[in-house]
Image (cartoon, rainbow, N blue to C red):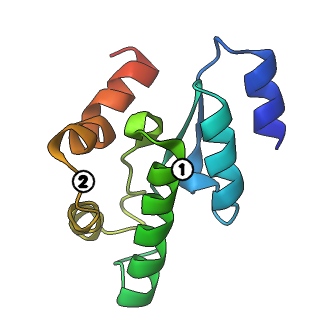
Amino acid sequence: MNIDDIAVDNPELKIVMCHLGNPWITDCQEVIYKNRNVYADISGLIIGNFTPPAEVHYRNKIKELLSYVAEPHSLLYGSDWPISSMSSYLDFVQKLQLDQESLELLMFSNAKNVFGL
């Protein structure tokens, strides 16, 4: 909730919450919903490879976040490689079944916007 206070007081400041705010993903989702200047990356959710229980859990959390926020402007791709497997993360992203525009935002365009690339 500290991030919400900073984001509200500094709307020109772009803030990235790492790991979807895990384990406070629901709080992260609310802060992103309220503040267009706050983003979150999907890195560091697992160590190594996604396994079915974790994969399903995080896939549902990300879909819930995207549904709640109503647009994918706020998510950035990340894997925390080498702690997490890059190939496992890429497979995980494909299983989100995002439309092409949302996938482009997650994998590139949002980072380009946040970091002014």
Q: Please, what secondary structure does the residue beneath circle 1 have?
A: helix
Does residue 21 appear to the left or right of 41 in the view shown? right
Residue sitting nearer the eye, 108 or 33: 33
Q: Amino acid at mark 1?
A: Tyr
Q: Position of residue 76 (x, y in %)?
A: 41, 42
Q: Amino acid at mark 2?
A: Leu
Q: Position of residue 116 (x, y in %)?
A: 39, 14
Can residue 45 be seen here? The reply is no
Q: Residue placed at 69% from the left, 40% from the top?
A: 31
Can residue 78 be seen here? The reply is yes
Q: Please, what secondary structure does the residue beneath circle 2 have?
A: loop
Q: Residue placed at 63% from the left, 59% from the top?
A: 25
- Residue 110, compared with residue 70, is above or below; it is above
Q: Which residue is mark 2?
A: 98
Q: Residue placed at 37% from the left, 30% from the top?
A: 111
Precedes in sequence: disc 1 or disc 2: 1
Numbered disc total: 2
Q: Residue furthest left?
A: 100
Q: Position of residue 15 (x, y in %)?
A: 61, 29
Res. 48 image quadrant:
bottom left
Res. 95 image quadrant:
bottom left
| Label 1: how many Cα within 10 Å (few below 14, some 14–19, many 20+) | some
Work out how far the residue at label 1 is from the one at label 2, CA to CA, in angstroms.
15 Å
Residue sitting nearer the eye, 7 or 66: 66
Considering the image in quadrants, where does the N terminus appear?
top right
- Residue 24, compared with residue 114, is above or below; it is below
Does residue 16 appear to the left or right of 75 in the view shown? right
- Residue 24, compared with residue 106, is above or below; it is below
- Residue 21, compared with residue 115, is above or below; it is below
Q: Which residue is mark 1?
A: 68
Res. 80 image quadrant:
bottom left
